[in-house]
C-alpha cells in the first residue's frame, strides 16, 4: 500500500512539472485556405491585427507565423471575435427605435421614417413617407399607407452595413488603428470634421504606415478648420448627400457657393465630384436591393395564382424578366441605358440563396446536379410540384430556377449540392421484408422516395 502511494506521488510530481514547462498560449483549432479539409491544432501567441504566431501540437512542432487571411474566413472571424480584435454580430447590431409602415393590401415595410414629426403625424415630402432601409431611402405614397407603427429594429435593418458597423464602434472606444479609421471615415462622411480629425490622428499614432494614405485627407481637414464658411458648406453638402441621400440638394448648395466664392471653386468642384460618385454608388446599391425585393414580390404574386409546374417554368423565363425590368425602371426613374449599365455590373450586393430542395430531381436528368452517378432519376415533376404547393417551397424552387436561367438579371456565384437527408446521397435506400423469406431475411434497394434517385439537394447563391 505504501509503495502504491509513493508511485502516485511520483506520477503527480512528473505531471506538475510537465504542466509548469508547457508552453503558454491559447490552444486553437482552425482550417487553412489552402487545405480547408484539414484541421490545424496549436498554441497561439502574439496575436495582432495582421496575424499571430502558432506552435503546432503534433509531430512537427516548429513555430509558424500565420496571417489572418491564411485562415478560412469563418475560423478567422471566430478567433478574432474571441480575441476582441473584431466585433461580434451582436455587438454590431444594436437595437433602435424604428417604424413599421402597413401598406394597403400588401403587407408592411420596416425601417426608419425620415420625415419631420408634426405632433402625432409626419410631415410628408411631396405626398410621400421617406423610409430608410439598409441605408437607402424609399418613398411610399400616402395613399398606399394604411397606418404607421413604432417598433424596435436592428440597426442593420435601417442603416447600411458600413453605417451600422461605424455606429457600433462609437458605442465603445476604438482599440485599433483600423477601428479609429473606420469611425473617422463615418464621421467625415457625416460632416463631423473635428471628431473625424481626432480619430484620424489616433489611427496614425497607432499605425504609422497609414500616414501616407491619409496625408491628403488631413490637409483637407486642416483647410476646413481654417475656413469656417467653407467648412459649413461642405458639412451641409455631405450631410445632405451621405445621410439624407439628397444629391440634387447637395449639388445645388455647392454650385451656389462656387458662384459666390470663386476663390474656393476647386474645393467645391472636388466635392461635387464626390457627390456624383456617391449618387452613382447609392443608386447601384439601391438597384441591387430593389431587384431582389421586387423579384420576391413578383414570384409570390404569381404563385398565388396556383400555376402548374409547366406554367411556372414558362413564366420565369418570359414574363417575369419583363415585369421586373418595367418595375425597376418605373420605380427608380431609369432610362434604358442606365438600366443596362446597372445590369452589366452585378458584382456588388449581398449573396442571396435559393434551393430546389426535394425538387432537385426535376433539374437533375441523371447526373446534371453534381457528381456523376448511374442512378436512374425517376420522379413525377408535376406530382411533386402539386404535393408541395406551399408558396414558400415553390417560391424558393422558382427563384433558384430563374437565377440559373436569367444571366442578364442574376449572377450565379456559388452552387451547393448537399446529400439527400433520407438516402445520404446514394439515391437508393435499403428495404427489407417484414417476414422471413425461404428461412432467412430478404432485403433489396429501391429508389429513394424523397430525392427520386438524384441523391442531392441543389441550392444556388446569386447576386
Image (spheres, rainbow, N blue to C red):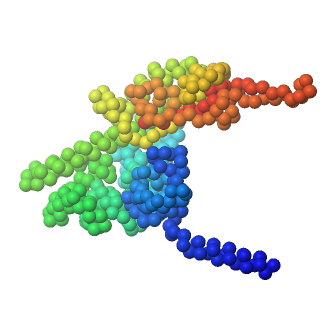
Return the residue found at the far right: 439
Return the residue found at the far front: 3
Q: In the picture, which quadrant includes the C terminus? A: top left
Return the residue found at the far left: 263
Residue 152, x across and y down, in percent: 51, 55
In the rendered view, does 27 fall on the left or right side of 160? right
Picture quadrant of residue 341: top left
Q: Is residue 329 visible?
A: yes
* Nearer to the camera, 143 or 337: 337
In the rendered view, does 316 fall on the left or right side of 236? right
- Taking the spot 38% from the left edge, 32% from the top edge, the residue there is 328
In the rendered view, does 132 fall on the left or right side of 311? left
Picture quadrant of residue 172: bottom left
Residue 253, x across and y down, in percent: 19, 50
* Nearer to the camera, 363 or 406: 363
* Nearer to the camera, 42 or 406: 42
Q: Is residue 164 visible?
A: no
Residue 165, x across and y down, in percent: 40, 56
Return the residue found at the far bottom: 2
Q: In the picture, which quadrant includes the N terminus? A: bottom right
* Nearer to the camera, 133 or 64: 64
Amino acid at each position: 500500500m505504501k509503495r502504491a502511494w509513493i508511485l502516485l506521488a511520483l506520477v503527480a510530481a512528473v505531471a506538475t512539472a510537465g504542466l509548469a514547462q508547457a508552453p503558454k498560449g491559447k490552444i486553437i483549432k482552425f482550417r487553412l485556405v489552402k487545405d480547408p479539409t484539414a484541421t490545424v491544432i496549436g498554441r497561439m501567441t502574439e496575436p495582432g491585427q495582421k496575424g499571430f504566431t502558432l506552435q503546432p501540437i503534433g509531430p512537427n512542432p516548429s513555430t509558424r507565423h500565420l496571417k489572418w487571411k491564411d485562415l478560412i474566413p469563418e475560423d478567422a472571424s471566430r478567433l478574432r471575435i474571441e480575441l476582441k480584435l473584431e466585433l461580434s454580430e451582436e455587438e454590431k447590431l444594436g437595437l433602435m427605435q424604428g417604424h413599421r409602415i402597413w401598406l394597403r393590401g400588401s403587407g408592411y415595410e420596416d425601417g426608419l421614417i425620415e420625415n419631420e414629426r408634426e405632433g402625432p403625424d409626419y410631415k410628408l415630402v411631396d405626398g410621400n413617407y421617406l423610409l430608410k432601409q439598409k441605408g437607402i431611402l424609399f418613398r411610399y405614397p400616402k395613399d398606399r399607407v394604411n397606418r404607421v407603427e413604432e417598433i424596435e429594429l436592428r440597426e442593420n435593418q435601417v442603416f447600411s452595413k458600413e453605417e451600422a458597423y461605424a455606429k457600433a464602434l462609437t458605442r465603445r472606444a476604438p482599440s485599433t488603428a483600423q477601428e479609429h479609421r473606420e469611425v473617422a471615415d463615418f464621421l467625415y462622411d457625416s460632416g463631423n470634421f473635428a471628431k473625424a480629425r481626432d480619430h484620424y490622428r489616433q489611427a496614425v499614432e497607432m499605425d504609422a504606415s497609414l500616414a501616407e494614405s491619409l496625408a491628403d485627407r488631413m490637409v483637407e481637414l486642416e483647410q476646413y478648420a481654417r475656413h469656417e464658411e467653407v467648412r459649413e458648406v461642405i458639412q451641409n453638402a455631405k450631410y445632405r448627400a451621405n445621410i439624407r441621400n439628397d444629391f440634387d440638394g447637395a449639388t445645388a448648395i455647392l454650385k451656389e457657393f462656387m458662384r459666390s466664392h470663386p476663390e474656393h471653386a476647386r474645393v467645391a468642384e472636388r466635392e461635387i465630384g464626390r457627390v456624383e460618385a456617391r449618387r452613382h454608388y447609392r443608386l447601384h446599391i439601391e438597384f441591387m436591393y430593389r431587384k431582389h425585393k421586387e423579384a420576391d414580390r413578383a414570384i409570390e404574386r404569381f404563385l398565388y395564382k396556383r400555376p402548374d409546374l409547366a406554367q411556372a417554368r414558362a413564366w420565369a423565363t418570359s414574363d417575369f424578366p419583363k415585369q421586373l425590368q418595367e418595375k425597376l425602371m418605373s420605380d427608380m426613374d431609369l432610362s434604358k441605358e442606365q438600366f443596362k449599365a446597372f445590369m452589366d455590373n452585378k458584382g456588388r450586393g449581398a449573396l442571396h440563396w435559393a434551393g430546389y430542395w426535394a425538387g432537385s430531381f426535376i433539374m437533375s436528368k441523371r447526373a446534371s446536379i453534381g457528381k456523376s452517378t448511374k442512378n436512374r432519376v425517376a420522379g413525377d415533376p408535376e406530382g411533386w410540384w402539386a404535393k408541395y404547393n406551399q408558396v414558400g417551397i415553390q417560391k424558393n424552387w422558382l427563384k433558384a430556377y430563374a437565377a440559373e436561367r436569367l444571366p442578364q438579371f442574376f449572377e450565379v456565384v456559388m452552387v451547393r449540392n448537399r446529400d439527400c437527408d433520407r438516402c445520404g446521397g446514394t439515391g437508393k435506400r435499403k428495404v427489407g421484408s417484414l417476414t422471413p423469406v425461404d428461412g432467412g431475411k430478404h432485403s433489396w434497394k429501391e429508389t429513394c422516395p424523397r430525392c427520386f434517385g438524384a441523391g442531392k439537394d441543389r441550392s444556388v447563391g446569386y447576386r
